[in-house]
Image (cartoon, rainbow, N blue to C red):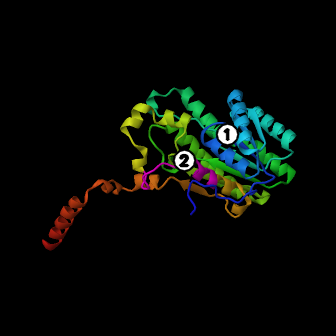
Amino acid sequence: MMKHTEPMLKEGALQGKTILVTGGGTGLGRSMSKYFLELGANVVIASRKLDVLQAAANELQAETGGQVLPVACDVRNYQEVEQVLAATLERFGSINGLLNNAAGNFISPTERLSHKAFDTIVGIVLQGTYNCTLAIGKHWIAQKQPGVILNIVTTYAWTGSGYVVPSACAKAGVLALTRSLAVEWAKYNIRSNAIAPGPFPTKGAWDRLFPPALQDKMDVSKKVPLKRVGEHQELANLAAYLMSDYSAYINGEVVTIDGGEWLNGAGEFNFLEQLPPEMWDEIERMVRGAGKSK
């Protein structure tokens, strides 16, 4: 019997492809990179800390037997992005996929933020995504080569959310970029899609969004109708599918993978989930009584 924690695609599904993963040395980026490697892809991982990348590259190669190229890059700097592209082409000869995963986020009342904090988050998330997309997209177009862009967004990219306002602004921009280029660049055989993950615990980002004091007071899994958080392999399965040729007719789509969390928060009366059966019995009697009195 198959489990949701098992790899989904057949062996060799990404054979011969080279994929750039920004923020690929840690967290969800590392998990997705690992699965790409297991499916036969070469992976380039990029972030600002070369020592973290090199350690991750060594571990990933040992775990999968695949080829990993670590390249230090601040995605806010377009020249550094172009250097990543050049290093990728020098090592592997081509690039087939881009996973814009690098992000920055933390919780804070907006009035407590400095303009520099705003700049940092919007810079990494939105500017970083369009820098990578533009550099690699132009390369594909010049080479008349197909390509796949996969962006990581959030469900609050379309609803907005207090206390993560810079991230919400930036992710909304990435969402618009995803859908816009899906139409404009389809003629070049470049597909553009996105994933909106719900709670998938990771060491770095998770601790910034849910510090221990907050974790003690708030069980995030209780907000999810499925009553659990996501497993990294579930996200990796989805990412690999959208990066693969199996999803060749999916373009401009945003796939939410959150166990129903955002829909649970969006529904005006979803809080009624908390009512015990005996209270529903009382409510039913009251409603029926009100109907008879008319």
Say which amino acid is labelled 1: Gly
Q: Name the residue under label 2.
A: 154
Q: In which quarter of the view is residue 186 placed?
A: bottom right
Q: In which quarter of the view is residue 80 placed?
A: top right
Which marked residue is nearer to the observer: mark 2 or mark 1? 1
Residue that extends furthest to the front in the rendered view of this protein: 1
Q: Is residue 276 magenta?
A: no
Q: Residue 24 carries which label?
A: 1
Report the front residue among 9 and 254: 9
Picture coordinates of residue 276 (x, y %)? Answer: 25, 57
Residue under the image location 60 percent in, 43 percent down: 28
Check disc 2: other Cα within 10 Å, few if <14, some if 14-19, many if 20+. many
- Left or right relative to 127: residue 136: right
Image quarter hosting the N terminus: bottom right
How far separated are the C-alphas under marks 2 and 1? 18 Å
Say which amino acid is labelled 2: Thr
Picture coordinates of residue 45 (x, y %)? Answer: 72, 38
